[in-house]
Amino acid sequence: MSLSDGRFLGLFWGEQRPFSTSSGGAVSFSAPKLKPLVCNHSLALGLLRFTLGKSMKTSKRSSVFLCLVVAVLVVAALFIGDFLQTLPSRFVDESSHRLQFQAQKLRDQFFAVTNFQPVVRIKNDVVFEKSAQVAELAVVSRPTEVTREFVHTWAGSTKKLRLRGIFQVRGGFDLREKFEIVVGQGKPKILLPRARILSVEQTDLQVEAFQNGFWNAISASDIQSQTAALRDLARQQSGQVATEAEENLRSRLKTILGRDVEIIIESSPPPAL
């Protein structure tokens, strides 16, 4: 394509060129018509504006998307941080509620067996105080028959008294002593005192021998003292009643509480009545 080619020149100056050539090769210039040039310039500016506008729209969309991503990440970070910060307290609250429920359940089951409420502790904190309408918990009641003979000689005169008595011996627990349920320290524990003989009640008394001496008669004090000694003998011969009471209560509690509860009985027995 040569300089004189109209197609080439038309690319720069539109349809009319600012110069012309003659057949002899001479070039003559003329004033250019600016309208086609201005039109092409306007078209170029329009294309540039369109391109820049599209680029700005694309940039704005990218910025908005980036802001949304950052906002989501910030919210997620705040949520995770709050969750991790409150996780220990949530765990403590759930553990506390679980222990509270367990303590109340054991208290109700214990009451179903004994008809009184012991002290209930969660670790070292007392959550339920002892509540009992009676002072004793009788677990075993067994009749015991004993015989005692009294012989006394004075100045060659002998008196003789033989008594046979039947006593109802009650074995159980003094509710004024320590009864506790403890949870939150490993395996739940039931703390009980040693059982004891609560009472020895006379239900029958028979005189099998009543012999006065000539000058050594049986007195009322003899009968009173021998009756009291008969009661003490019944207590001595009923030592296993307390052991039976402990085993009885332990078995009943194990049945209703299950094997996951440890029952502990104090090793040192209280003094007998």
Image (cartoon, helix red, strand yellow):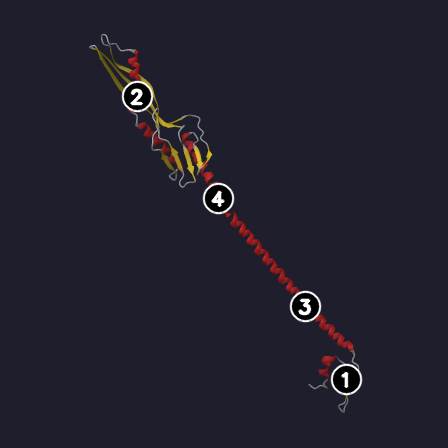
Residue density around tag 2, few if under 14, some if 14–19, many if 20 or more, within 10 Å:
some
* Residue 64 image offset from top left, x and y in percent: 63, 60
Q: Nearer the viewer, mark 4 or mark 1?
A: 4
Tag 3: amino acid: Leu
Tag 2: amino acid: Asp
Q: Secondary structure at mark 1?
A: strand
Q: Which residue in the rendered view is the most extreme toward the top?
A: 214
Q: Nearer the viewer, mark 3 or mark 4?
A: 4
In whole angstroms, how far apart are the C-alphas of marks 2 and 1? 152 Å
Relative horizontal placement of residue 20, taking residue 257 as reference (left or right)? right
Tag 1: amino acid: Phe
User: Which of the two discs, 2 and 1, labels the residue nearer the N terminus?
Assistant: 1
- Quadrant of the snapshot with the N terminus: bottom right
In whole angstroms, how far apart are the C-alphas of marks 4 and 2? 56 Å
Taking the image as drawn, is residue 139 in sight? no
Q: Secondary structure at mark 4?
A: helix
Q: Secondary structure at mark 2?
A: helix
- Quadrant of the snapshot with the C terminus: top left
* Residue 120 image offset from top left, x and y in percent: 44, 34
Question: Dot 4 corresponds to which residue?
Answer: 92
Relative horizontal placement of residue 82, taking residue 121 as reference (left or right)? right
Q: Residue 52, which numbered label?
A: 3
Q: Residue at x 75, y 77 (%)?
A: 37
In whole angstroms, how far apart are the C-alphas of marks 3 and 4? 60 Å
Do the CB atoms of the residues marked 4 and 2 lie less than 8 Å apart?
Answer: no
Question: Dot 2 corresponds to which residue?
Answer: 232
Q: Secondary structure at mark 3?
A: helix
Answer above or below: position of 237 versus 86.
Answer: above
In whole angstroms, how far apart are the C-alphas of marks 2 and 3? 116 Å
In the figure, residue 175 lies in which quadrant? top left
